[in-house]
Image (cartoon, rainbow, N blue to C red):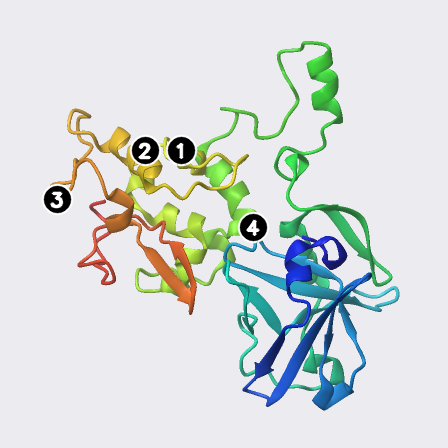
């Protein structure tokens, strides 16, 4: 998350427009010294509305947030109705905005987020930052070290004194598998954050919530705490796209010589991710790899057999 005034993505939208077919209006975008602005001529003439912040990795998509005056009450913001999707910078409706009714003029521009919902939004996309009187203060944009590891002052002091205990939360090997996955699930979702009837094999939306799927898989439940997010992902780097790296992690556990670990009879040395964790489209043009690792009828069909990975 960063101010649009500092965003290369926001600058690339200068001069573009998006026709909202559902409402029959056109959003027009202009980049200024203050950041990205949107106009909605059919509703507000040429009066610009500042899209103050952009959040999202940009690889799958990015959305915009503007804070609203809220006084001493709960913080409020407007999540812009239009987002950017994919590397081609395609403009389309923000997820879950289709069909929303307009009950007050500002909702022509997007959906109001307030209170705890807004705090969670900011919490997952920043290291620090809180809304006070309609302004975001103490902003440390994006997800930095202290987001996962906590305040760094004691850690630095311990390192300078060459102490064995470096006083760092989630230091290497210091937490259980459940604790690590729960921490990652704070933003990437944990089963406790979903309704029980949502957690089912045919719910393709779960592909977006990787910890939820992983916790259902036999690979996790039979690993005795050995399979965690960091088994395959380095949290300090952007997730690599080469599937061979992930296949190697699968093979390391499922090699034929590893006792009761099953070697795949179809393709024991490659294509693990392609078959068992296919990219699943959660909305047009946006796909995530399904972490509910399981056998499938084919690349799109699902065999709801949770006993065998």
State which tag comes first along the sequence, 4 or 2.
4
Residue 245 found in image quarter: top left
Q: Mark 2 points at which residue?
A: 249
Q: In this view, does 158 lie above or below 56?
A: above
Compare marks 1 and 2 and give the one earlier in the sequence: 1
Q: How far apart are marks 1 and 3 (CA)?
A: 24 Å
Disc number lying in front (4 or 2): 2
Crowding at dot 1, Cα within 10 Å, few <14 / some 14-19 / many 20+, comes out as few
Spatial CA span between label 3 and label 4:
35 Å
Per the image, label 1 sits on a secondary structure element best described as helix
Q: On the picture, is 294 further left or further right than 112?
A: left
* N-terminal label among 4 and 1: 4
- The Cα atoms of the two marked residues, 3 and 2, are separated by 17 Å
Which corner quadrant holds the C terminus?
top left
Q: In the rendered image, which residue does mark 3 sit on?
A: 266
Q: Do the residues labelled 1 and 3 touch (CB within 8 Å)?
A: no
Most extreme residue toward the top is: 162
Label 1 and label 2: CA atoms lie apart by 7 Å
* Residue 187, numbered circle: 4
Secondary structure found at label 3: loop
Q: Which of marks 3 and 4 is nearer the N terminus?
A: 4
Q: Distance between the residues labelled 4 and 1?
A: 19 Å
Q: Residue 133: name its quadrant.
A: bottom right
Question: Measured from the top left, where is residue 286 in percent x and y?
Answer: 44, 62
| Among numbered discs 1 and 3, the one appearing first in the sequence | 1
Compute the Cα span from label 4 to label 2: 24 Å
Disc 4 crowd rating (10 Å Cα; few below 14, some 14-19, many 20+) is: some
Q: Earlier in the sequence, mark 3 or mark 2?
A: 2
As drawn, 299 above or below 15: above
Residues tagged 1 and 2 counted as in contact (Cβ below 8 A): yes
Residue 104: image location, x then y, percent? 73, 85
Provide the residue designation for mark 1.
231
């Amino acid at each position: 998350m960063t101010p649009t005034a500092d965003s290369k993505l926001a600058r690339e939208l200068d001069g573009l427009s998006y026709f909202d077919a559902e409402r029959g209006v056109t959003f027009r975008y202009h980049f200024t010294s203050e950041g990205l602005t949107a106009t909605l001529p059919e509703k507000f003439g040429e009066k610009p509305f500042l899209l103050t912040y952009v959040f999202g990795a940009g690889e799958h998509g990015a959305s915009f947030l503007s804070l609203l005056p809220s006084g001493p009450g709960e913080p409020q913001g407007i999540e812009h109705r239009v987002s950017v999707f994919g590397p081609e910078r395609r403009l389309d409706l923000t997820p879950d905005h289709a069909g929303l009714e307009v009950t007050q003029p500002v909702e022509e521009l997007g959906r109001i987020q307030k209170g705890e919902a807004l705090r969670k939004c900011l919490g997952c996309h920043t290291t620090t930052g809180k809304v006070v009187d309609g302004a975001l203060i103490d902003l440390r944009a994006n997800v930095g070290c202290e987001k996962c590891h906590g305040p760094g002052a004691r850690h630095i002091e311990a390192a300078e004194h060459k102490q064995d205990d470096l006083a760092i939360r989630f230091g290497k090997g210091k937490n259980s598998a459940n604790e690590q996955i729960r921490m990652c699930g704070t933003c990437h979702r944990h089963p406790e954050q979903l309704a029980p009837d949502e957690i089912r094999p045919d719910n393709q939306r779960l592909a977006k919530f990787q910890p939820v799927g992983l916790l259902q898989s036999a690979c996790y439940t039979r690993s005795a705490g050995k399979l965690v997010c960091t088994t395959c992902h380095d949290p300090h780097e952007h997730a690599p796209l080469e599937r061979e790296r992930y296949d190697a992690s699968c093979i390391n556990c499922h090699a034929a010589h590893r006792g009761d670990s099953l070697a795949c009879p179809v393709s024991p040395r490659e294509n693990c991710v392609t078959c068992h964790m296919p990219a699943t489209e959660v909305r047009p043009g946006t796909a995530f790899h399904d972490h509910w690792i399981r056998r499938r009828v084919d690349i799109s069909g699902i065999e709801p057999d949770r006993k065998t990975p």
